[in-house]
Amino acid sequence: MEPNYEELDADGVLELPAEPMRLNMGPSHPAMHGTIRMVLELDGETVKDLDIQPGYLHRGFEKSCERGNWSQVYPYVDRLNYVSPMLNNVGFSLAVEKLCGITVPERCTWYRMILGELARISDHLTCNSATAMELGAFTPFLWCIKTRDWVWDVLEQETGARLTHSFGRIGGMAAPPTNQMKDAVLAVLPRVEEAMAETEALLLKNRIFLDRMQGIGNLSQARALELGVTGVVLRSTGVDYDVRKANPYMFYDKVDFDIPIGHDGDNYDRFMCRFEEIRQSIKILRQCVEKIADSGPVNVEDVRVILPEKQDVYNTIEGTIAHFKIVMEGVKPQAGEIYSYTEGGNGELGFFIVSDGSGTPYRVRVRPPCFFNLAACREMLVGDMIADIVPTFGSINMIGGECDR
Amino acid sequence: MGTFKLDGKELTFEAGDTIIRAAWRAGIEIPHYCWHPGLSIAANCRMCLVDIKSARPMALPILAWDEKKKDYVEATKNKLQPACQQEVSEGMEVESKSAPVLKAHAAVQEFLLLNHPVDCPICDQAGECKLQDYWATSQKKLKREGPIATGFEPVHKPKAVRFGPTIVYDGERCIMCTRCIRFCDEVVGDHVLDMRERGNKNEIFVSPGRELDHAYTLMTEHVCPVGALTSKDFRFKARVWFLRSAPGVCTGCATGCNSWVDYDPRPMSSHTGGRVYRLRPRDNANVNEFWMCDDGMLSYKRFHEDRVLTGRIRDGARVVEVVRDEAIDAATAVLRSFAAGGKKRIAIVLSAQHSNEDNFLLAKLGTALAAGGTRSVYLAAKSAAGWKADAILRDADPNPNRAGAMAVAAGPVGETSALVKAVLAGEVDLILSLGFAANEAAEDLAGLSNVPHVNLTTNIGPLTQSATIVIPVATTAEASGTFVNGKGVAQGFTRAVHAPLGITSAWETLNAVATALGHDLALARLPDVRAALKLGAGSPATAAEA
């Protein structure tokens, strides 16, 4: 670029500024997912310091929950981590059921695990392939997203929606598994494995990819623990903390799977952990499909929680009253507060919910895993190059809907 | 005063208290249908059964299922007692949540719903029905399987029976708690309702040759715990779970019954929003206990019927409707020229229908305008013609705030008839009046339009018809305020709905007029007005706060 003549000094020499340059990256920047602003202090292309400012996707999720009834929160939790909404549905269901003291039938629990693990696969496929794309490798992105669509086909067949399922219910699910569910799950898993193998073949011997991933975006184990980081970002530093193992919920203690961990806490470890977790999810899914019963109840048999059959509603007064109570006042958990946590797509997804005994939530507080992961992002990036921001930021799997709520 | 234990919790009781009343005092509800704190004890619904642990139990022989023997064996159980009938004694231990009690509640509830019609979707009680509430807390189950659920024809009884001009009865929904009968007998002293037949033919009926037509018929609907009695006025008008309640004070008479103003909070632009749908008694042991009369219950209609919603300016014999702000401008111009004129004799007409706040601002503005002239004060009150007082609730004076208005006047107050004479005698140059009500008919007040007469009103009435300029203002449902009842008790009420078309309360309107005229009364906020009222002469707001 031609130098601007005003910046030349008297001798016609171009004087470069010595102080760091301040640069705003985002929020309207494709790599910032449209929702994050980073204020960078740059020395040339090296990041000296940066300030990460979330909040552009804040939409009052938690406050909105205090308006409807407990069941009406489901569409909101769909939109937290919208890359794996089924995991949020399951997490919220478990929280309210814990407060109500409800235990769902076994078939429902297996079904929730199946849908949840499918969502985890789609989450990790999205994150890893996007990281590759952000380094210029567009083909893996297309392959993985195509595979994700096949996973979504299964979710669509089961829930009726590809992305925002709103499929969880207090005390059960919106519908029982379809007859084709097992076949569909077993059919899609080899295709996921194939896509991963192809992607790894493309990337893992690629010098450019390795150089951009290995040793970039490092996070030490000690700092990760201090910052409350969870999920893959924590496990990539060598901590084997996974809620599914550390505090087994549903039937995760009845299936055999391993927790992959890294040791450097860099982009490469996070990438490899995610792909290995997909393999573990596939392992879990095969066991779940084997164990889930072909018939049996999915919803609890309490008509104060689950809507009665229409035949009862139209023909008996008890059914009519049950319908009225659930629709007009909502399910009423006992007054109290609980914290319930599950392994979400990007870490420990916690729901701290408070009930005053009415049908309307008194408080729904979400522990968004990626908010804590995002807090660790500054330390990962200081000292790296400006071009490293994009893959590093991508590899923490920050999802605006969940981070900002 | 002694203490006893309910579910392990220490409660106090007063001499003569039953278990349910002592619990009710402590804010604990023991499920019940037939018991009402204001009525006698019937103990016929059996919903309030409790287990009294401390007394020597009356053991009932029963057959209990033995899981080991796979057979019924002889056993005993405590006889449960109705909490509404059992008097508390010192140190008594009562269980209201133990397994046998809950089982009894569930059984009673199941029995009551056995023949109940599937009416919730068309029943006005749905949403505030005890049958629904106790199903959720006590029965919790669908109808049991078997012949009862399939192919069984429930007992049919008369539906939609006209009991009188205000009440409709549905025999199938009735649970025979007899609250309505007891209310008529004990509170009204009119034995117009009774029960006839037994078992499946049991029903409530009206005495032959009579109608349910005393002054408190709507209270029978209010005490009905289910949807058996419904009010013709409220039937099919609104669903109660869409309504919200604001604490109000009835405008019907000087008793000042405390009420809940039930309104639809949705915007006025929606099909049903922004309207008051009914009044319900708000319990106040010192004023109205648990009751209100029919006229009081229906006084909410005045919030929406015969309203003045636009300004009105008299042009000779013609009255022209103008937008509200234009009427305020015209009134301001009239008041300005009065203040600038030579003879300054103003007549202030306070209203026994308006709140202390409204009357206070009117008196303040009148005083400010009369500077350098004279000010005479009158009181407009609704005529008692056609109004029947009684010894229960209905006061002889059909005005809610005569005492408050008199206190605001803090001096001699004339009748509206005296004002007409004064105007005709040429002793008054300007009238500033509040409210629509007056003791006389409109034609008797015609003389009041001989001089400029500015009237602020909510509804059409004789005083309004004799004004030259009318400014619409908010009703008691649309603005917060204070009334002082006939016994000198000051009672506040809170705004329920928003006033339509940008209309404001009378005191806000008067404050705006005063500001436009250059008088800064420093009374722009309700707390300011109330503080000034307390300091002012007569102190109506401090007269025995409710």
Image (spheres, coloured by chain):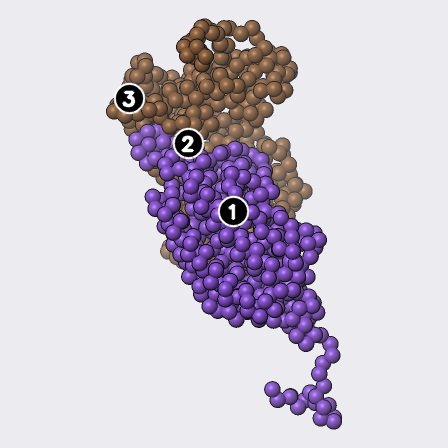
Residue B313's quadrant in the figure? bottom left
Using the numbered discs, state the Cα–Cα distance from disc 2 to disc 3 in whole angstroms.
Answer: 22 Å
A35 or B269: nearer the viewer: A35
Q: Tell me the SS state at disc 1.
A: loop
In the rendered image, the quadrant that contains the N terminus of chain B is top right
Q: Tell me the SS state at disc 3.
A: loop
> What residue sits right under mark 2 in the picture?
A301
Using the numbered discs, state the Cα–Cα distance from disc 1 to disc 2 in whole angstroms.
Answer: 26 Å
Residue B410 vs residue B325: left or right?
Answer: right
Query: Which of the numbered marks, if any, corresponds to residue B147?
Result: 3
Q: Which chain is purple?
A: A
The residue sitting at 62% across, 12% down in the picture is: B90
The residue sitting at 30% across, 14% down in the picture is: B197
Contact check, label 1 and label 3, Cβ < 8 Å? no
> What residue sits right under mark 1 in the picture?
A65
Is residue B374 at least partly visible in the picture?
Answer: no
- Mark 2 is surrounded, within 10 Å at the Cα level, by few (under 14), some (14 to 19) or many (20 or more) other residues, namely some
The residue sitting at 41% across, 29% down in the picture is: B132
> With respect to residue A309, does A23 lie above or below?
below
Report which colour depicts chain B: brown
Mark 2 on the same chain as mark 3: no
Using the numbered discs, state the Cα–Cα distance from disc 1 to disc 3 in whole angstroms.
Answer: 43 Å
